[in-house]
Amino acid sequence: MFKKIIISLVIIITLISIPVYLHLKNQQITNPKSDQQQKLDLINQAIQQSFRQTSLIDLYQKKLKFTFKQNQKISTAILSLDKDPYLQITALQKAIKLAKIKNKYIYFVDLSIDHPYATLKNY
């Protein structure tokens, strides 16, 4: 009797564990990302949605420096990893729009500090 109970338990456990094992095996294994990497991915996504031609130059002290083209002119921008990336991109787009109204282009813009600034140049 005791042998039958043990064998039954082994069969039940085996029947339950095989589908669970197969389910877990088929799930993708994800690597945890650091907060900084998640912020960097979010900023990169915002940049890619807003600008067609960009290139990452440097990442230092929670700041991202990149270049982008506007009307065949290359501009440089610095963004903060601590601030909302979409707000920074929106501010950058507004600065580009104001520069176009003044018939200029943005040569350099730093949105990473409390008092952001931009350097404009004539075409």
Image (cartoon, grey):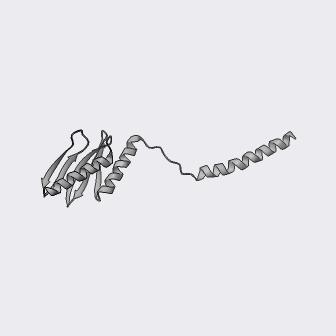
Figure quadrant of the N terminus: top right
Residue at 76 percent across and 44 percent down: it is 10
User: How many labels, in total?
Assistant: 0
Q: Is residue 3 left or right of residue 31?
A: right
Figure quadrant of the C terminus: bottom left
Image quadrant assignment for residue 69: bottom left
Query: Residue 49 versus residue 102: which sits nearer the camera?
Result: 102
Q: Is residue 89 left or right of residue 33?
A: left
Residue 18, how many percent across, how many down?
68, 50
Residue at 42 percent across and 41 percent down: it is 34
- Furthest residue toward bottom: 71
Residue at 53 percent across and 48 percent down: it is 29
Residue at 15 percent across and 57 percent down: it is 101
Residue 47, how many percent across, how many down?
31, 53
Q: Is residue 65 left or right of residue 33?
A: left
Residue 99, how many percent across, how many down?
16, 54
- Furthest residue toward left: 122
